[in-house]
Amino acid sequence: MGRINLLALFAAAFMGIVAALVLAFIFFNDTARTLLRASVQSVPFLLLLLLLIFIIVYLIAARLTRHIAQSINKIDFDTPAHFYDELDEFYQNILRRDRQMESQISDIRVHSQTINALIENMQDGFVMVDPLGTVITANPKAITLFGARQNPVGKNVITLLSDTTFLAMVDNAMAGKGGQMSITKSEHVVQVSFVPSANQGVIILAADHTEKNEAERMRREFSANVSHELKTPLTVISGCAELLMAGMVEPEDVARFAEKINLGAKHMLELIENILFISRLDEKDMREAFSPHNIADITAEVVDSLSQIAQKQQVEILCNADALVLQCNKMLIYEMLLNLVNNAIQYNVPGGTVEVSVQEATQDDNSPICLVSVSDTGIGIPEADQKKVFERFYRVEQSRGRKTGGAGLGLSIVKNVVRYHNGNIALTSDSGKGTRIDVSLPI
């Protein structure tokens, strides 16, 4: 643009000289002719004059350009003090572009921070790998799930997991073919998905499926156990009924067979009620039914309802319950105490005792709790079985469980009730000496 402007100035100067000569020829006839002839005869002079004009114009233009450039460079666009009016439009355009760029950069920064926050706090692992196999992003959850010893960001993906199948899946995803695989790290089952990225890289998603797989296992076991538990009393009821219908039972044995049918029906009814109760605990939050209740009154009701069973088993119940008011679901607390005390009776020995204690205590942070303790002098629980007794349908002694009519759901109900009340449960037991279960509930 500088050369074009310079040629324009030179052309303008030349045309100015020509115009001056033409005007002089028109208005000053004789003198103009003389001057024109002299000029034509002095072509070297004219060329020299034009060259001189060109040099002068060039020097003036260069000086003006430097002066304008220096003035523009000295402008403070934030607070301009001295400014050329001719450059005001230029200045306003720069300000508009500057504001647009600042706005766009601010939006990009906000979006970037939002995305980073989402990735960092995802419940699943998120990893992004570039086409060269370098990890660009890896959130803390991914590092934990893959068990990486160091932060893999900026390093090759092999530092995330050095598994041949894993690396092959990464290569396939880079080629445009996604896939999934499962890995086991520190007893956790991790489902890994490989998604091809738009930049020919790979996005790796990792989800902890340990609880899901455990829930599926428990569901299968629950279904199998329910079928097994129902099959036993149904077999007894069906067999006795067939014998009675066929007239193959002596008259004096009819009452005994009827009692077997009645006991089988009661066992089935109890089992179904327990299963439905656990299902409600699993599917519905019963905290909406919480209200103040005196735990001593609920304990007295439980002890009274089980007194005849205790007498039949030759077991003595000792109860010491302080009057403590809890915000709780009375039905659930009743079921919890009923199962604890009933287990202590059923798995006791003739002449044994069951001690029920309810008292106020404090936690490590000095917050008050209600401590419910049920201990017995029964057969106890072997150490190998103590971690499993709270599982559904688990019985320490299968033969004893059959004899007492238990289905192994009592302590599972207790555990769920304690969980719903944000409490804790602990078990201590010596095989052949007795068992003690402590339940702490917040006051």
Image (spheres, rainbow, N blue to C red):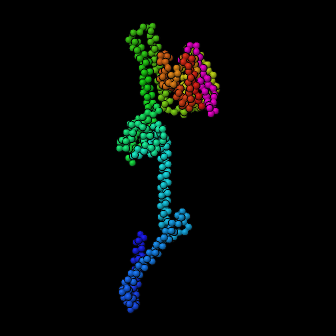
Return the x and y of residue 367 as percentages of the image width and height.
Answer: 63, 33
Q: Does residue 355 sit above or below 151 in this rendering?
A: above
Return the x and y of residue 110 as percentages of the image width and height.
Answer: 50, 51
Residue drawn at (49%, 56%) of the image: 103
Query: Which residue is more in the foreground, 241 or 42?
Result: 42
Query: Which residue is more in the foreground, 219 or 254?
Result: 219
Q: Does residue 260 sit above or below 386 in this rendering?
A: above
Which image quarter: residue 304? top right
Q: Does residue 355 sit above or below 147 in this rendering?
A: above
Which image quarter: residue 30? bottom left
Residue drawn at (54%, 23%) of the image: 339
In this picture, residue 84 sits left or right of residue 318: left
Which quarter of the rendering shows the C terminus? top right
Residue 345 visible in the current orientation: no
Which quarter of the rendering shows the N terminus? bottom left
In this picture, residue 155 sits left or right of residue 430: left
Residue drawn at (47%, 23%) of the image: 393
Q: Is residue 372 magenta?
A: yes
In this picture, residue 324 sits left or right of residue 258: right
Query: Which residue is more in the foreground, 117 or 399?
Result: 117
Q: Residue furthest bottom?
A: 30
Query: Which residue is more in the foreground, 55 or 262?
Result: 55
Return the x and y of residue 240 as percentages of the image width and height.
Answer: 42, 14
Q: Magenta residues, as a range?
A: 345-373
